[in-house]
Amino acid sequence: MRNPLIKRIPRELKTEWHKYLVIILFMVLMIGVISGMYVGHDSMLAAIHAGWEKLKLEDGSFELSHKASQELLSDIGSGEKADVRAYLIEKGQKEADKEVAKQIDESLRDTVTKAIGEGVRAQCQALGITDEALISEQIDAAMQEGFDAAYEEARAAEEFKDAEKEAYEKAHEEVTKKVDEKWGETVDRYDLDNADFVPQRVRIFEHFYREEAEDYNKDGTEDATVRIYMSNSDIDQASFNEGRMPQKENEIAIDRMHAENVGIKIGDTIRIGERDFQVVGLLSYVNYLTLHESNTDLMFDAFGFDVAMVTPEGFRSLRTRVHYSYAFQYEKKPEGKEQLADASENLLKALITQTLVYDNEIEDYLPEYLRQASNFAVSDIEGDLTSTGILCYILIAVIAFIFAITISNTIDKEASVIGTLRASGYSRTEMVVHYMSMPVIVTLLGALIGNVLGYTTFRDVAVNLYYQSYSLPACSTVWSNVALVKTTLIPLTLMFCINLYVIIRKLQISPLRFLRHDLKKTKKSRAMRLPRWSFLRRFRLRILLQNMPNYLILIFGVIFIELMLCFAFGIPDSLDHYADSAEDMILSEYQYMLMDSTDADGEIITTSEKSAEPFCMTSLLFPKETGGFRTGMGSGGDESVSVYGLRKDSAYAPLGEKTGEDGVYLSSAFCKKFSLTKGDVITLHEEYENKSYTFRVKGSIEYDGGIAAFMDEESFRKVFDKKEDEFSGFFSHHRITDIDEQLIATVITKEDIVKVTNQLTHSIGGALEVFKYVLIVLAAALIYLLAKIIIERNEHSISMAKILGFLNGEISSLYILPTAMIVVLFSLISFGVGFCLMIWIFRVFVLQMDGYFSFFMSPSSMILSILYLLIGYTGVSLIDFFRIKRIPLDVALKNIE
Amino acid sequence: MSENFLQIKDLTKSFGSGQARQEVLRGMDFTVKKGEFCVLLGPSGSGKSTLLNIIGGIDTPDGGYVSINGDKLEEMNERQLTLYRRKHLGYVFQMYNLIPNLNVKENIEVGAYLSDKPLDVEEVLTTLGLSEHKYKYPNQLSGGQQQRVSIGRAVVKNPDILMCDEPTGALDYKTSKEILALIEDCNKKFGTTVIMVTHNEAIKYMADHVIKLRDGVVRHNDLNTEKLTALELEW
């Protein structure tokens, strides 16, 4: 026979549907959203990883100034270094030979001419001819007649041959000497003599592109720069989110994200350069998941930059210069970052030397593992879920507690029944199982619906969030074990354990005590004495004291609600605040990073800008101790630190004193992010070399824009083995106009900081707005549940108060007012707690990311977050008032029924 | 009737400590035979409910013992006590303690579920005159009807002992007699041993065995030679 108690469960669900509906809704929303995020996250990563194979992602690329010959490509492909020295000597000697031959020839001709002239003049003098005109005539005639023979005779002379040989030898020596001098520098610069060099064989693909002006609204002004590739490329292919590949000369497919941002649709005609193209497809290039125009760009720009695909005919019809870009794939791709770094270094050596010997020039070289456009999104997607998970567990714990309290109240209410059942022979285990069934069923139901929604609707929401930020390929849903564990198994276990603990604890007492309604573990010897207040005030206080455990849960709930509201209001505020304080986020109005401190002629780069101040900089890594939060691009989970070498009296980040070789000042962001203070010791290490540096923190410099360390330039150069005049760039208050743009790697200005927040706001702003309202609804639902528990628990007393003649208004003031006082008081305190918790959570979150971002809430948001709670509670009080009104008089008179 | 089916020996029980200590049972001795209708009679505070609870295995004595069929309750652990209650006892309380969201039939099934040899639920419903109410919920029934359900829940287990704690305490005269008649029927029909706690002197006339308690001791331990039926009782 099946246990008849099971039949209670559907009935309980039916009669208390609104309570369970709210709880299930909670669970569905939380589990659904988190599960959706995980599934979306896993699906997206799976699609990206699959795309790497399917769409043939490069392992790196290089651009040459001229189209490469097949021989050059084949030699680069071999991975071998060219013998540049021999080439240079041979080339130099050839040039020298030409020069020497020319000079010898000129000199010999002069000598012969002079000898003939002098001979004729001597003969004329002997004959007594003095007429200069006649002499000249005789010389010309002699030259015409005898020059060639005399020239040949002179050339054949042994003396001449010796001199000629000597001249050539001397010239060759000179060439060799000069090449060796120059070669030394080149070798040093590119570490060409490294004994660890291993040839890295690669397959090379033509991947030419043109950059054109895009005028999508055809108003005659350039709206964006578009980088155009041919549709027949064998490498770095695209997946189509919508539409198809271009097939006609006037057809084009453009990046989906850019199209979405600027409002281009399939079928639109856009002007590229000087001709019109019809948009037939929206694509995502495997190597452009984010639209970074240049690898040194701080942030991608999906508004002002676009990538596109046209047919080869379409490509030829364009007018701007072709960028001779070549992509490569290793024949045997090294695994691991360090190995990749070594391989790309080795290939670079081959590339430098081979292009040199083929008289070509490298314009750009970028190994894929360093490529922002293909790694930024992946790295960002990989590490953004932990904090959401934590938030989910906190909420599940709150719901579990609400459940536990609800069940605990039910047990109190059903004490006689439980006592009777236990006295009749029902075991404690059977009772525990019975009272556990409801939370388990509701959680399972929530988890089931949540997961279904997670794999469908919410997955789409999450994927769309990624699509709003990045140019990602189309993805299909993949099964996520992590999602199952984190959104279903952990919440179920959490719910199960909390409820099991409360129920077991509650059912510990004997059947007899249940029958006697003697349910308190400890008995108070006497009631607390209250001050001589009015009766109603004392009554209220008694209610408050009697319901203390429920109020504690309410307070816990209010704290959680405030935490959610701080999250909802704080994130957009923090983004705005970051943008508003952009000026404090940069060390100088203009920060120029140079490619090198010298120009092509080896001259130190200088500027006439008065405010310009040179600085040295290198990037190192600071190990994070937070564990495997993130394994993103290049960072290996460690924080990237910019180490600056500054003048002692720098106008941009004054150090005040010499730091010495073992001392550094840290940026305020660095100190705050890792809780570092003066006197702490930090160890920074190189990313691709097994080399580390230990420094003692000498203080901090007010700079929230980045994780940076500062040293005086002298110490910097010693520590990092830099030459005395070597530097990395300039700080400047004004734009520097007298440095060739080719020499500038990047310029960081306030706009770059604002660009970051604008992109973030664009990417997540809409979702945050939705999130804010979801949280507000959740907050109202939570407070509804908690207030309901308090009224339910006091149903008997309320009914009795009604029998005694208290009016509904009086009863409401007795039972609602204490709750209102608690809510008002604790909304203020909870705001403080929620705010602090949010700062902590934010810190944990920021620790997973590179860089620093502080939590900020504007005063108006602070007030609103409290006000929203109170408005929500006012609504709930109204419901409570009607709830009290509906409690019948016979509750107090009847038996359990 | 077998001898000494239920044996109570030197049973003591007190509550509180120090000056507040109150001895509720002070060395109680008696035996009950199988199939006997035994009434524990006494005023409030005489210890009858405490005694019933100890016999029912939901309370423990300070001294002495209770043995059923030779098995001493004091030697049983919690699990064995639960099994003892499950297999041998049926409980009827003054307050009916029905499960509010189960209907009449289901409330009776709650008892049947516990038993290895339950009676037919429909038959019990008919016996108790509840057939037409079997799909009603407890709050749709009168007090007497609810107590019938409570008896049904206890009887359907086909227990060896039916423990009744003031089963008519909350009922009117007429309904009380009906309830007593039902308990009497069960006793006769199924041979169930009945131990009924009451302060109603009139009920003693329908019992086989009357034990009068006062101040925690047995004052009278009498066997009725001539019994009245429940319906013949007057008070």
Image (cartoon, coloured by chain):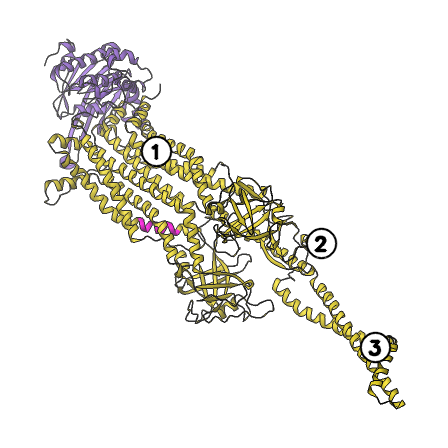
Chain colours: A yellow, B purple
> Mark 2 vs mark 1: same chain?
yes
Residue topped by disc 3: A160
Nearer the observer, A533 or B189: A533
Residue at the bottom extreme? Answer: A128
Q: Check the image and report above or below for A715 versus B122.
A: below
| CA–CA distance in space, label 3 to label 2 | 42 Å
Residue topped by disc 1: A24
Q: Position of residue B150 (x, y in %)?
A: 23, 19
Residue topped by disc 2: A71
| CA–CA distance in space, label 1 to label 3 | 106 Å
Label 2 marks a residue whose chain is A
Element type at mark 1? helix
Residue at the right extreme? Answer: A127
Bounds of the magenta segment: A834-843
Report if residue A96 lies within the magenta region: no
Say whether residue A283 is left or right of residue B22. right
Label 1 marks a residue whose chain is A
Going by the numbered disc 3, the residue's amino acid type is Phe
Report if residue A838 lies within the magenta region: yes
| CA–CA distance in space, label 2 to label 1 | 69 Å
